[in-house]
Image: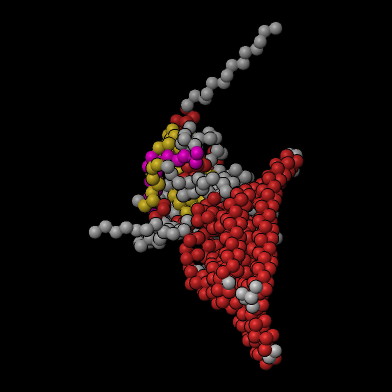
Amino acid sequence: MTTSTKPPRSPAAAALSSARGAFLATAGFSGAINILMLSGSLFMLQVYDRVLASRSVPTLLALVILIVILYTFQGALEMLRSRIFARIGRSIDSRLSDCAFDAYLERGMPGGGKAQPHSPFRDIEQLRSFLSSGGPSALFDLPWMPLYAALLFGLHAWLGYIGLAGIVALSVLTVLTDRFSAEHQREATLKSNEAAQLAEASRRNAEAVLPLGMSTHLLQRWRNVAREAAIAQLSGSDVTSLFAAMSRFARMSLQSLVLALGAYLVIAGEVTGGVMIASSILLGRALAPVELAIANWKGFIGARQSYRRLQNDLKAPLPAAMVALPAPSQRMEVDKLTVTAEGVAEPILRDISFALSAGDGLGIIGPSGSGKSTLARALIGVWAPARGTIRLDGATLDQWTRIQAGSFLGYLPQQIELLAGTVAQNIARFDPGASSEEVLHAAQLAGVDDLVRRLPQGFDTQVGEGGQRLSAGQRQRIALARALFRDPFLVIMDEPNSNLDSVGDEALSRAVASVRARGGIVIVIAHRPSALAELSLILALGDGKAQAFGPKDEVLRQVLAQPAPAKPKIVQAAG
């Protein structure tokens, strides 16, 4: 017997599905509200046909009390419906925020896909804002228009025909509004996000932008994108306002036409005066949801586009493994590892293979562009292999969750950027359960304990956004302590001494030796020979391939023995 498993629904679809009960409740409230909306028409019908004819003040008083009670219930239901919609938006926000945060982080990963100008957080905000507006109420009132048309037919056939014609005409206007404004709205959203992204990138790189005189050129580029966004937004607004004006004109004209027809029918003796007034109120109520929907159509289109993007951007979380693997402690094997960049046919790394055991230290060397940093990112799980495998104690890295893998991985990237917070928080990887002893131990392993104590508030010193309050060397040494936090089994360092002085170099060598001494594996990518001092093995890369792998002295001897590429001869022209 075979079993078929359905693919997991996207978090966006699951969030909407979880609110099904609340949507059904609002649908029920909408039915009750639309039935109560008939109160005004019935009240006018009774006043004109019964009270004025009988001149009965008690009847009038009873009708007034009744209509006030009905209007009170109607107002309470409308308030409840609005509150439910607002809470649906809050529920969707809370259910999607974690997935949105993970998806936003994934975008920053190499190979994380094409950069997107929109933000999932902004899309969630768009959904929540629309649900809190009057738009959903209008959409839930639209299905009740046939009820009002049927009541108009009950009053008189000609009144029903006018009401039906008005409902059809405004429904067509709604469809045209969607058709002609959706593309403008989509273009305006994309361009607005692109302009915001460009402004943020310029701000982050202000240290280079301002001194190099790039601000004028970037301003012009931003202005062009912002102008395109404004034009698209203006075009969409013009379309929406045009159809909104047309719907308002149609509703007011039809109401006057119904009133005039009712007056004619009264003169002809076919209906009463109360029917004339009630029919005008009924038609106005029938057409009001369409007019309100068109007025809120921009928000509806934005919410619909945001929901579609969230369906594509947010992935369902992987099911938890039935068996939680222990942290690796013995071996690392890389077999025919090949890594490619998105949209590039030529691999960056091809068929890289090597094996390391507990206590080994590997140095990766090679010229710029040989794939060293790409290899580091692949080994740490940042860049997914196109082919080949990376195994720790026989298991591939994806057999652990990212949280589990973080407990036995240490990584010092080439580009150091600390997060806003204290030094202690950065060393502890912002784990609120980290103890002071664990933070101090990592700082001592990285040889940064004395340096941190000399800071104004010691370990409680705020580093600022990106660690801007610290020097490049201080940031690198604190990031080294972060990589060594809780004694990870596999530690990978990419150019760990690029900003270090001689004291920092010595601390780095001691840190590498400590990892090997406790039975961990350490991999160092280096240009400067001092970073190789405590390593036992060397992998030499060239043109994305492994040129040599083995004991350090042997590989270095082999690499140094290779002849340097011949320098081109310079021929001086005669004369």
| Position of 413 relative to 482 (above/below) | above
**To which quarter of the image does residue 172 belong?**
bottom right
Q: Which of 433/365 is in front?
A: 433
Q: Please name the residue shown 64% across and 75% down the image.
A: 269
Residue 513 percent coordinates (x, y): 49, 49
Left or right of 429 on screen, residue 362: left
Residue 500 percent coordinates (x, y): 61, 46
Q: Which of 10/211 is in front?
A: 10
Left or right of 58 on screen, residue 407: left
The rendered magenta stretch, by its main secondary structure, is classed as: strand
Residue 462 percent coordinates (x, y): 67, 60
Residue 445 percent coordinates (x, y): 54, 55
Instruction: Work out which quarter of the rendered image holds the C terminus and state it.
Output: top right
- Whether residue 2 is in magenta: the answer is no
Q: Please name the residue shown 47% across and 56% down the image.
A: 315
Q: Please name the residue shown 67% across and 70% down the image.
A: 264
Q: Residue furthest bottom?
A: 58
Q: Does residue 231 appear in the picture of this structure?
A: yes
- Whether residue 342 is in magenta: the answer is yes
Q: Does residue 524 appear in the picture of this structure?
A: no
| Position of 302 relative to 25 (above/below) | above
Q: Please name the residue shown 47% across and 26% down the image.
A: 562
- Residue segment shown in magenta: 329-343
**To which quarter of the image does residue 260 belong?**
bottom right
Model colouring = secondary structure
| Position of 350 relative to 188 (above/below) | above
Q: Residue furthest left?
A: 1
Q: Which of 73/13 is in front?
A: 73
| Position of 82 relative to 469 (above/below) | below
